[in-house]
Amino acid sequence: MIRKTILLSALLPLASLALTAQPDSTTTESGRILTSLKSSTTTLSQAKSANEDEKWQPMRANFSIQSDMLFSTEDKTKNTWFGNSYIMGILKNNYLEMGVRFEELYKPLPGHEPEMGRGVPHLYVKGKYRWSELTLGDFYDQFGSGMVFRTYEERNLGIDNAVRGGRVVITPFDGVRLKAIAGQQRNYFDRMGKVFNPDRGYLLGTDLELNVERWSAAMRNNDYHLSFGGSFVSKHEADEDIYVGVGDDRKRLNLPLNVPIMGLRTNFQKGGLALFAEYGYKYNDPSADNGYIYRDGQAALLSASYSKRGMSVLLQAKRCDNFAFRSQRSALLTPLMINYMPAFTQAHTYSLAAIYPYATQPQGEWAFQGEFRYNFARRTALGGKYGTGLRINVSHVRGLDKKMLHDDPELLMGTDGYTSSFFGMGDLYYSDIDVEITKKVSSTFNFTFTYLNQIYNNKVLHGASGEKPEKIYANIFVYDGKYRLSNKVALRTELQYLHTKQDQGDWVYGMAELSILPSLMLSFSEQYNIGETKKHYMMGSVTYTHGAHRVSLSAGKTRAGMNCSGGVCRVVPETQGFYLSYSTNL
């Protein structure tokens, strides 16, 4: 049945009760959450003294450019330029900061077509005084791990969900930090020429951090760090006509105009031990992501790590259920995401290891990750003369054990959709076992050898159907060697092999990269499918760096596939031609 709209006014008092904790967590290259060993909260006494002692300093200007272009030669009869360019200017001192960014994507790179446009979609002014900070305009922020709220920019994926509006941060007491935000998210260039797009909604949010060790000298003296906290975010969106059923059974969905989400988190650290936990709850949010069902959403994650000299251990678990949260209910893929669910999987940088990447499934998943690192000491049997590094990473992701209320997806609209037990698990989505050995052989040569075993649910993660394999099983071998030929010349080589009986079959990859300090780098790579397609993907490039300037020219062909970062993915097409990239930061 259709549940009643939940009013924001009934839940606003909860915002003032939200308790927060751990400083904004960041996601590493392996997509895991790391907790800071020190509090990020600026104390009241520090904030006051810093501003009372500092006089108004001269304004300093910062200027940056990034431009990536492709001269496509795929169509022999029509050579075409494509490009994504960004120009950013920032003017700031110790009290004031102003920024503006111009973007030129009138003919964007292939795969970035939804981003087409040009103009100034990002501008802001920020002021700081004593224990307060105010931002007006476009801003990025994150509450906790991002489970409840995260705005960020990832140009390779075409993600920029900055909020345009106001952001206030105050630190009124030692160990206390309060944030409040309000505004409208960016959706490419759909509000050029106006401050806001009247056809889209807006969001409000608060976040409070309490760092307990700031109030206890005994905890600080014994290196204890303990924090608690919570967040509250609500999106407001206008009503619209969405119908379910046919004929006499046709009914209009009663859509909630305000959808709140809230979360609690805690962080404990002592020496090399770190524990982090976070829980989020989202009220019914019928959307295109979940097929317009009215089930509430939940997410929980636990992370524990321990490290000492030469050794570290990481264990993580996460469960999410119907937890996609966007500022527009009809949006799909990457736009307008309010929250972020980190992927508890290794983020691979080697080409063949990244052919089958994992994309987080916020509609329902159980995810586990464990990592063990150990350095065998020098002058031991396994360490040798220079020592040996070992890293083992295991990721395992499964769906939820869902019991659907109807077999027909059309009949699920307007209902709770399904039931699921908290600990119940469904089909395997992804499995990844990585074993990496790093060895320094001499003063001029070191190498890394990696073995990976992957299982990829092609049906769930890539929408495969028909004769396409439902699951792909792959074994991958990677050798990465680095040779220092002289004080100014170094050579790095890669050899990779992927074996699978599914999909397109086996792949091989080779790369040689010559670095001539301090400015020049030359590289050549070849990726070849020795299975079904027999396709070659060769690429040669030269990169020159001078001071703050970097320019790169490449020629060749890139393979179609999934481009991913932190569990967020998008499909990119095959391209061929000349690639030119320039960047500077002055």
Image (cartoon, rainbow, N blue to C red):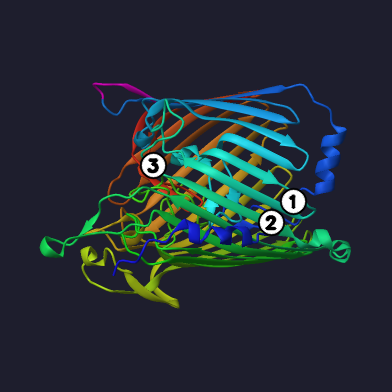
Note whether 451 is above or below 542 in the view shown: below
Counting residues from the start of the chain, the first of labels 2 and 1 encountered is: 1
Gap in Å between the C-alphas at discs 1 and 3? 34 Å
- For image coordinates 41% across by 38% down, the residue present is 187
Q: Earlier in the sequence, mark 3 or mark 2?
A: 3
Say the numbered circle drawn on residue 41: 1
Of 143 and 240, which appears nearest the observer? 240
The percent position of residue 206, horizontal first and vertical second, equals: 59, 52
Few, some or many C-alpha atoms within 10 Å of disc 2 (few <14, some 14-19, many ≥20)? many
What residue sits right under mark 3 in the picture? 200
Lower sequence index among marks 1 and 3: 1
The image quadrant of residue 136 is top right
Please report contact status of discs 2 and 1: CB closer than 8 Å, yes or no: yes
Q: Is residue 256 above or below residue 489?
A: below
Q: Is residue 103 left or right of residue 23?
A: left
State the separation of the CA atoms marked 2 and 1: 8 Å
Disc 2 marks which residue? 209
State the CA–CA distance, disc 3 to disc 2: 30 Å
In the displayed structure, does residue 505 sit left or right of residue 354? left
Q: Quadrant of residue 492?
A: top right
Q: Amino acid at mark 2?
A: Glu
Q: Amino acid at mark 1?
A: Thr
At mark 2, the secondary structure is strand
Q: Nearer the viewer, residue 72 or 59?
A: 59
For the residue marked with disc 3, what is the amino acid?
Answer: Arg
